[in-house]
Image (spheres, rainbow, N blue to C red):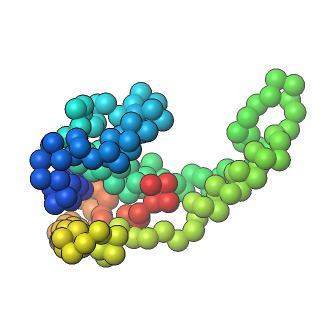
Amino acid sequence: MLHAHAERYVGAYYADDAAVARDEKIRSWLDALDRLIPNGIGEIAAKPVNRVGIARLIGAFIYMATVQHEVVGSGVWSYQLWTDRIPVRMYRNAQREPLDVYQRLVNANFNLNVHRAPLLQDFAYLALDRAGRDLFTRFLRELQTLNTAMPQPPHAPWWIRPEILKANINA
């Protein structure tokens, strides 16, 4: 469903693969991602640049920032402040962690415990135009339909209902 939404959105703004390839901002974005992400993005966003690869990449980002983040559970971060018991670094000379490490952990704990936007909300305001808003509205309806169709409680422990997903801050 996430990938289908990305395909529709990319299709609404790019008539064909040549239109994507001509878009300098897309090419620059892909180059930066390929350079900054370990092992690059070549297996997801194919070269030459095309609509299929862009949609696959965007769908993967949405999945990573919602479903995958929920599956791995950000709640584990709640234990991070006990660095005297579970240090994030072990120095050979047994020195304590520098204050900047502790402060970064406090900052991360704060960020991961603030209220985040639910995926089941209207993101149409992010769209560039009416066509994009309509696509976001369709995506929301599809998520709501899936959420209603899923059994309560879930059939299996790994099933994640859309109503518990958040648009994560890491995205």
Give coordinates of residue 169: x percent, y percent: 50, 60
Up-down relation of residue 134 to residue 13 (above or below): below
Extreme residue toward the left, this view: 16
Extreme residue toward the top, this view: 92
Q: Residue at x 41, y 63 (%)?
A: 167
Q: How many marks?
A: 0
In this image, 33 relative to 169: left or right?
Answer: left
* 116, 16: nearer the viewer: 16
Give coordinates of residue 102: x percent, y percent: 77, 49
Up-down relation of residue 1 to residue 29 (above or below): below
In this image, 113 relative to 102: left or right?
Answer: left
Whether residue 90 is visible here, answered yes or no, is yes
Q: Residue at x 15, y 43 (%)?
A: 17
Q: Quadrant of the N terminus?
A: bottom left
Q: Quadrant of the C terminus?
A: bottom left
Quarter assignment of residue 118: bottom left
Quarter assignment of residue 122: bottom left
Give coordinates of residue 86: x percent, y percent: 72, 42
Up-down relation of residue 47 to residue 53 (above or below): above
Whether residue 137 is visible here, answered yes or no, is no
Q: Residue at x 69, y 51 (%)?
A: 105
Give coordinates of residue 103: x percent, y percent: 76, 53
In this image, 26 relative to 102: left or right?
Answer: left
In this image, 80 relative to 31: left or right?
Answer: right
* 61, 47: nearer the viewer: 47
Up-down relation of residue 30 to residue 74 (above or below): above
